[in-house]
Image (tube, grey):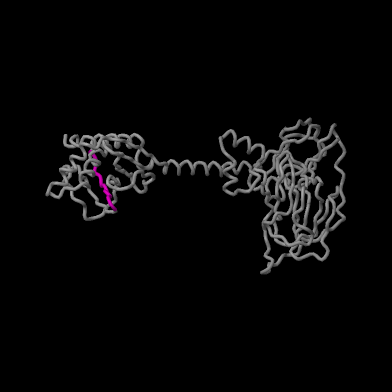
Amino acid sequence: MSHDVIMPALGMAQDSGILVSWSKQPGDAIAVGDALFEVETDKATMEVEAQHSGFLNNVVANAGDEVPVGQVIAVIAEAPNAVAPQEVSQDDVLPEGQAVIMPALGMTQDTGLLVNWLKQPGEAVRADDILFEVETDKSTMEVTAGFDGFVAALLAQAGEDVPVGHNVAIISLAKPDAPVQRSNRAVTYEVAPSAPAVATPDQPKSAKKAVVVPNSGRILASPKARRMAHERGLDLQQLVQAGHVQPFHMSDLDVLEGMVSSTVATFAATALRRLTAQVRAEQFSEIMSLVSAQPTGREAGAVVAGLAAGAWEQGQQDIVIAYRQFATTQQFTNPHHIGLGKARADDEVAPAQLLIYDLRNSAITLIENCADGQPTLTLLSQGDFLALTLECRSDHMSADAALSFLTEFAGRMEQPLRHLL
């Protein structure tokens, strides 16, 4: 028994492929899975594997030839020097229009089982309308019409196996007077070339090709692309979610790697750090009581900002701190350089490097995800304790810097006299 070797459809936008080279020579023995030839399409070179064992015969295409999808280019037979593939009739002429072919849904596929037609002869269709369902490798896929127009011909019936690349339907621009419906036969039908289409308001011309829409969750990719994706640790599902057209080829892996790199970089820049600490509030409360009783203008914001500034890089760097309490915001520049509680709020608003939410006397008991333009520090009362929460993005502070800052600040809040030493 002999098997035809055809030019495969490696992409839904492909109607021909350039045969780059043969990996086997006429008369060579071939096993299933052997690299048979290379084909180039859409600037991607793909390796096509043999789907049958036997001997390569009747090679009718040479390296460099551009071959239409579905055309027989060789035969794999049980013995060398098998007879050439039988010429088929092209006497039947179908209505003019755009041909819809049986797509290649996998590299191991040479036919597809037409499960069901979802449009009938003469019916109007849009390019994105589902035209038919095809089953292969235990997977059922929906295939769109690919063109706007009318169903002028259906060339296969439900339940028939149709070779990959063979015409299964014709979409015409004008509504057909006598739409055709027939069974798939072992002949190649000639499609009369359509006259230049003129778009009308009701029927725009579409240049879209048929697109395969998976409805089983199965991802379509060439064996080489699937293998290389696995070796590189890439998830083809990300291409599906991004809306890239299947089946996927090697060129799509470069796109996927770019998507992964961008995602990793974005995540690294926006990943949120959240550190919490709990300290006894006794000494801090005493300091605040003394400050509030002083007629010198000292205030809670200056004290808290001073303690935070002293903990920021151990007080060795300049810092602007925004202190917010009861919807009122004060801003302090280097409050640790002036003396505990003596700093005055700035009149001019400058970009703050740290935002402090003082929620000790509010009804709020939990706060999360407040970090935005700068690291955020929140203070909450919990009985005899103070709960301290530091939130920042990874591009705000390193993990070590965040840990060091919160540890130092917690120590100063629990023992404010440390600030004066």
What quarter of the picture does the N terminus occupy? top right
Which picture quadrant has residue 3? top right
Rendered view: 160 above or below 108: below
The reply to whether residue 373 is visible in this rendering is yes
Q: Residue at x 35, y 37 (%)?
A: 275
Instruction: Give the magenta-colored segment's residue range.
Output: 315-326
Q: Residue at x 25, y 47 (%)?
A: 320
Q: How many marks?
A: 0
Horizontal and vertical percent for residue 154? 80, 55
Is 341 on the left or on the right of 278, as rendered? left
Which picture quadrant has residue 402? top left
The reply to whether residue 356 is visible in this rendering is no
The outermost residue toward the front is: 383
Asked if residue 284 is among those painted magenta in the image, a careful observer would answer no
Rendered view: 26 above or below 343: above
Horizontal and vertical percent for residue 412? 23, 36
Given residues 174 and 348, the one toward you in this image is: 348
The outermost residue toward the left is: 295
Q: Residue at x 81, y 47 (%)?
A: 159
Rendered view: 89 above or below 227: below
Given residues 372 and 261, the one toward you in this image is: 372
What quarter of the picture does the C terminus occupy? top left
Is 384 on the left or on the right of 420, as rendered? right
Horizontal and vertical percent for residue 192? 80, 59
Asked if residue 321 is among those painted magenta in the image, a careful observer would answer yes
Horizontal and vertical percent for residue 33? 72, 33
Given residues 175 and 275, the one toward you in this image is: 275
